[in-house]
Image (spheres, rainbow, N blue to C red):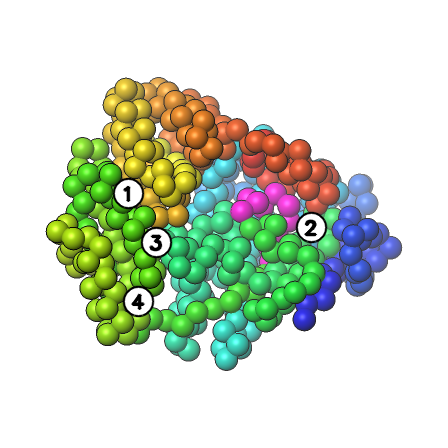
């Protein structure tokens, strides 16, 4: 059973958390008082951090062209919460950073004073392998975690971008799940507990260490995909899955978009237990549908037989597992390319691709698309900055008219200004209210999220 969220206030037990009105909490005090306004801010940080864990920001630490003043690298959750409290009280904008792989996603912040790094919070805290769960600090890279889990024949069932550099906190903040999402769910389905540092110095914990939780606040789901605007994730607890005994990838050249769309729907509506399903499309080339099976050799052979029955006379070939890196390849050089995330209804994939074709042709840009059967895809556009900008705006209008969305993730330096998120919809007032509850001073990643949150 899950109890109410446990909140530890690193600042002062006499100062209640802003969540206190809605939850049963207890607080623990801190030996580090808030420095008075007359004290130097940097000295306040040095009183908390270990020697060498604070340094001036370098040009490599720039955030969307803005140069921060300091980089803080706390060694514990408590240190992180305390320095965050000081920065918040002093009115400084704080940019949380893990591996830095997605630091330029979202809108550019209007200010960036301090980079708060989780790089030293990289420990695997607990892995009760018999329970298929793991507790890990936010600065641990995905690859490091997966390597440790593999020793017990287990995995965190996701495949985010750049796993050798991307951290747990970073992929949670950006909700980067990958192609395995089709079978195992998104990060919100895999996370079962978390601890976050709030700007007032509170460490808030919710969830638990068991897969079935029936009470308490879902803070871990709230901060997943919030781009670090509500709190800094310091640790997470995940449900795990066994590593597959065998895998096999098959690729189908469907010839037309209509056949690709129908095959995706047929596979999804079948009894096949496929793990991933995607379509790859580029300019005038015919679409290719990839499907991943995992399991025993006998089980995979049976699944392949069902697929061949569904496909009929369409050619099916075994493909290398590397095709599941196709989405990663969209981010490769040249950096002059723009990459956007689209989200459409699965039944509208073919129509969406036709819209991309027409828009790209009209604006004289080239394109590549990798889209999952869930309707979530990555689109790469190349052309002059002005043409790409016009194409993005036109495509966003077309998609939003059909209740779909386009989010600009990678943008070249010369691309004219464009909102990363597009129309926020009716949820914006609620999102602003949540932001105000967690971060009333606008300390964390100001202006980077939907609607300028």
The earlier-in-sequence mark between 2 and 4 is 2
**Location of mark 1 (residue):** 261
Q: Residue 294 carries which label?
A: 4
- Horizontally, residue 317 falls left or right of residue 355, namely left
Q: Where does the image place residue 158, in percent across and percent down from the top left?
A: 41, 59
Q: Which of marks 1 and 3 is in front?
A: 3
Q: Is residue 169 above or below residue 36?
A: below
Secondary structure that dominates the magenta span: loop
User: Which part of the image, by quadrant, shows the C terminus?
Assistant: top right
Residue bearing mark 2? 198
Q: Which residue sits at x=57%, y=45%?
A: 226
Residue 43 vertical position relative to residue 413 in the rendered view, above or below: below
Farthest residue toward the bottom?
130
Determine whether the residue tagged by mark 3 lies in a helix, strand or loop. Answer: helix
What percent of the width, then of the height, locates residue 354? 28, 31
Query: Residue visible at 69% across and 50% down?
Result: 198
Q: Distance between the residues labelled 1 and 2?
A: 45 Å
**Can you identify the residue that label 3 sits on?**
269
| Place of residue 86 in the rendered image (x, y in percent of width and height, measured from the top left) | 72, 47
Please provide the residue range marked out in magenta: 225-234
Spatial CA distance of label 3 from label 4 is 18 Å
């Amino acid at each position: 059973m899950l109890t109410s969220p446990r909140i530890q206030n690193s600042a002062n037990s006499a100062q209640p958390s802003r969540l206190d009105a809605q939850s049963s909490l207890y607080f623990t005090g801190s030996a580090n008082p808030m420095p008075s306004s007359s004290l130097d801010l940097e000295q306040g940080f040095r009183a908390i951090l270990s020697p060498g864990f604070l340094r001036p920001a370098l040009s490599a630490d720039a955030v969307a062209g803005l140069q921060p003043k300091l980089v803080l690298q706390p060694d514990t959750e408590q240190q992180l919460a305390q320095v965050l409290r000081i920065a918040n009280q002093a009115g400084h904008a704080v940019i949380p950073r893990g591996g830095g792989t997605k630091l330029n996603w979202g809108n550019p912040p209007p200010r960036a004073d301090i980079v708060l790094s989780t790089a030293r919070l990289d420990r695997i805290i607990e892995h009760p392998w018999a329970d298929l769960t793991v507790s890990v600090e936010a600065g641990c890279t995905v690859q490091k975690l997966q390597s440790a889990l593999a020793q017990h024949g287990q995995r965190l069932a996701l495949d985010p971008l750049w796993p050798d550099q991307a951290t747990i906190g970073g992929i949670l903040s950006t909700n980067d799940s990958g192609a395995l999402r089709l079978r195992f769910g998104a990060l919100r389905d895999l996370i079962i507990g978390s601890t976050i540092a709030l700007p007032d110095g509170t460490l808030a914990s919710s969830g638990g260490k068991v897969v079935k939780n029936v009470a308490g606040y879902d803070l871990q789901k709230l901060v997943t995909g919030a781009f670090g605007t509500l709190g800094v994730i310091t640790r997470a607890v995940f449900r795990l899955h066994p590593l597959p005994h065998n895998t096999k990838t098959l690729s189908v050249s469907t010839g037309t978009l209509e056949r690709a769309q129908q095959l995706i729907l047929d596979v999804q509506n079948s009894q096949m237990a496929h793990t991933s399903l995607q379509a790859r499309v580029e300019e005038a080339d015919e679409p290719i549908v990839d499907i991943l099976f995992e399991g025993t050799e006998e089980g995979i052979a049976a699944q392949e037989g069902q697929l061949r029955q569904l496909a009929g006379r369409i050619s099916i070939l075994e493909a290398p597992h590397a095709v599941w890196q196709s989405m990663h390849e969209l981010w490769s050089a040249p950096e002059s390319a723009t990459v956007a995330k689209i989200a459409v209804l699965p039944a509208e994939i073919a129509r969406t691709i036709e819209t991309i074709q027409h828009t790209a042709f009209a604006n004289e840009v080239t394109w590549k698309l990798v889209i999952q059967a869930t309707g979530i895809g990555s689109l790469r556009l190349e052309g002059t900055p002005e043409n790409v900008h016009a194409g993005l705006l036109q495509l966003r209008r077309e998609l939003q008219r059909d209740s779909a969305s386009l989010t600009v993730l990678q943008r070249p330096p010369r691309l004219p200004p464009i909102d990363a998120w597009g129309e926020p919809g009716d949820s914006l007032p609620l999102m602003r209210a949540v932001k105000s509850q967690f971060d009333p001073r606008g300390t964390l990643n100001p202006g980077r999220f939907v609607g300028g949150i």
